[in-house]
Image: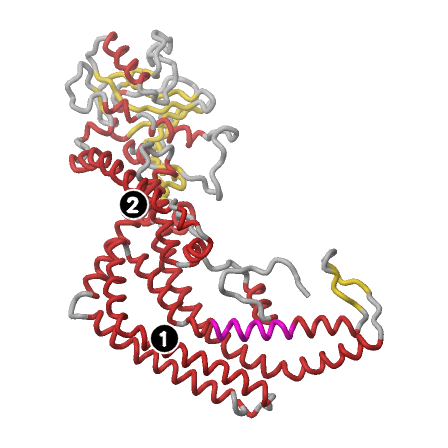
Amino acid sequence: MVLKIFFPQCCNRADSGLLVGRWISSQDSAVVLAVIHYPFIPGHVKQYIQQVSAEQTSVSAQVCIRDTFSPRLCLSCIVMTFESQKEQEEEEEEKVIFVHYEQRKVMLSQLHPIENGVPDPITAPLSELRQMFQTVANSQPLFFLDRYDDGPLKSTHWQTEGREASIIVELLKQACIPLCMLIGWLLSIWTWICNIRIFSLYPLRFLSSKLSTCVQLSYRTEYMRLLSSPKPAAGHTQFMRKANIVVSFLVDVALGMLLIWWLYRDNHITMLANTLVPAADHVAKELDELLQWLMGAPAGLKMNRALDQVLGRFFLYHIHLWISYIHLMSPFIEGILWYGGLSACLGLTFALSLLSDMVALLTFHIYCFYVYGARLYCLKIYGLSSLWRLFRGKKWNVLRQRVDSCSYDMDQLFIGTLLFTVLLFLLPTTALYYLVFTLLRLLVVLFQGVLHLSVDFINSFPLFAMSLRITRPYRLAEGVKFRVLCEEPGTALHLLMEINPLKCSAVVQTYRTPTYSCYPKDSWAALVKKLFVGELIYPWRHKTTKTD
């Protein structure tokens, strides 16, 4: 039988005494937590261990003396006689392995499974290593009982090396209570305002679900409600999630304040307002030239003259309306930018979301061009597909959602042939306009997508977990590795246990805050299919059923 003893490094040079720890019977191993030094009164030891039991530490209900290996007290810890390492000799026949570990690092670390996903602690049996980590992690009250070194017992553990808690951290913990109460009260007022009946009307509810600023505001409200909860974190995962949210919020606000400092320094807002109207005029001029090119013979293509002129004049009229709208709003643009820039005090994500909404409003004419061209192109594509089924004696069954056989008379076939010919010869002209405005729309969507990815990155990236991985890698453990310290014949084997930190990619995957975007999450194949048949890739409506 192999007996494994996990021994803390801080106790290697301790004086003789009793070992306090846990015996894991299923693994034939013992986890040593501290050393109680001689001389001591047995009654004080019993009272000390009862206090440990009251703190609900994860220790076994056995006490034994190494000299005799006979139980003397039925307490909540395992107590064994400890002599200095120089005097230790193994007289038993079973092999003993001493595994030396750094108690503070093991106590503060969180062991992660190598596989993706955390096993169910109820159904999955705990391994020896995981039981050892849990034993050391749950033994913190054992060390807090004598942190001022004024008790009747003298012991050795990791805290006896002079490490003490920070006063600033303790003050921050006490200040969090009234702060959480204040945030909860403000959130209750905000929730009452949002529940007013006028905000539940369909137009306002629809706009709030599509505007990026409103979506980010709902995110921030949900995060603040989670942080202001009076309940403590239930486990390590929830604690890390709250910590990541707090750090992301602080970084977001800091970046927003930097943006405000740049905007309101050297009158940059006036410069942006003066640049916006000429840029809009330049875009309108380029679109006008593009439409004039399409109304002629673009790239030498032979287009339908009548349909080409109708579509070109229709889009030119919309450009003139858009330019008139921009010039009408030009006196108020500086004020809009000035007050809109103040939203960055809530965080850089609010400023980016507001910028995305402003881009959507300023490019609304391009969106209209894309919708007009896509709807016209989609109508012709589905019309041609329906008439093609007519030639084959088929039809689309709306009720059964399938293609069935059907017999047509001569009049239906004649009308179908005429319509098919008209749609087929008008398709190139419509397809050209649809292609041009789809490319323009994709440029706008690409820019907005970069803004949304930046917002999602700030909201979801686990900054706290990544900073722990960089500064204190032992806090996030993936596993352990062992190094041989002493291996001599006739003596016990001594190993040094070192913690393997979690990989950075695994940290991001494990602790990334889940978010969602207002854009539809389609695959590349579905996106190409939608572009080919003329379905809208944006806005937010999905085509669920096939129509004929």
The three-letter code of the residue at mark 1 reads Tyr
Give the residue pinned by disc 1: 325
Q: Residues within 10 Å of mark 1 (few under 14, many from 20)?
A: few
Q: Nearer the viewer, mark 1 or mark 2?
A: 1
Please give the residue where the numbered disc 2 appears in the rendered image.
246
Residue appearing at x 60%, y 67% in the figure: 529
Q: Is residue 375 magenta?
A: yes
Residue 443 placement, left or right of 68: right
Is residue 257 left or right of 125 when viewed as pictured?
left
Query: Is 32 covered by the magenta stretch?
Result: no
For the question of whether residue 503 can be seen, the reply is no
Residue displayed at 59% across by 75% down? 377
- Residue 111 seen in the current view: yes
Residue at figure coordinates x 39%, y 60% from the top left = 452
Residue 179 falls in which quadrant of the image? top left
- Classify residue 547 as left or right of residue 229: right
Work out which quarter of the rendered image holds the C terminus and state it.
Answer: bottom right
Q: Which residues are magenta?
A: 368-381
Q: Secondary structure at mark 2?
A: helix
User: Percent from the top left, x then y, of residue 244?
Assistant: 33, 45
